[in-house]
Amino acid sequence: MLKYLANYKSNYTFNDTNVFINKGTVESPQWEAMFVNFTDKESFYLPQGIYTAGMVVYSRENTAGYNTVCLPFNTTPNMFAGCKVYIYNGINNDMTSVSFREAEANEDILAGMPILVYGNDDVKWQLGGSELNIIGSVAEESTGINGAFIKRTLGLGYYKLNSAGTKFVKTTASSTITPFRFYLDTDGEAPSS
């Protein structure tokens, strides 16, 4: 859970986890936190503004096989120790195949950029860093790939990675997208909420 304190008091120390304090104005907020801990599969939303955290941590378990990943802070493939990281190239013209390319070791993966990560072993990822900017939402793209920070119903006509992490499968009417994952949209339309 994230907490927000709208008015910063210079004598207030904010060492609590997931507490943001506005050091800007109401018109131009500048939110800061000492420590932000993102919990895998739990939705989060940040109001409009600029967010900076002294320390950010995101962890995920059960990572053997392919994983769809979309994080609210910048990363590099090196953060995913022992894994291969792939960046989306696109969907072919007849919408029958998706292509990814392997990322360079130090390549910047921007906040909100969906990636595919493959791990041979089931290890716990501990990702993050210090003095990171955080984004609050992911824009729906018309490129065929969309990340999510909030759990919501996708409905029919999309593709997401199956629970075994072995292939993309077509969604059903009740399919949902899990936070910090991505889904494929072969029609280029955003799902209804």
Image (cartoon, helix red, strand yellow):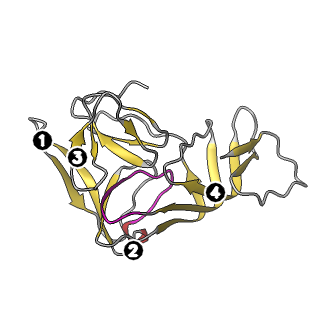
Q: Residue furthest left?
A: 94
> Spatial distance from mark 3 to mark 4, Cα to Cα?
31 Å
Residue at image point 28% right, 31% down? 172
Residue position for label 3: 168
Q: Quadrant of the C terminus?
A: top left
Q: Earlier in the sequence, mark 3 or mark 4?
A: 4
Counting from the top left corner in percent of width and height, residue 13 is at 84, 58
Q: Residue 137 magenta-drawn?
A: no
Disc 2 secondary structure class: loop
> Spatial distance from mark 2 to mark 3, Cα to Cα?
24 Å
> Spatial distance from mark 4 to mark 1, Cα to Cα?
39 Å
Does residue 57 appear to the left or right of 87 in the view shown?
right
Q: From the viewer's perspective, is the residue at label 4 or at label 1 nearer? A: 4
Residue position for label 1: 92
Residue position for label 2: 81
Residue at image point 39% right, 40% down? 177
Q: Is residue 150 above or below residue 82?
A: above
Counting from the top left corner in percent of width and height, residue 191 is at 35, 28
Disc 4 secondary structure class: strand
Residue type beneath disc 4: Val
Identify the mark at residue 36; answer none if there is no mark. 4
Residue type beneath disc 1: Asn
Residue span colored magenta:
62-76
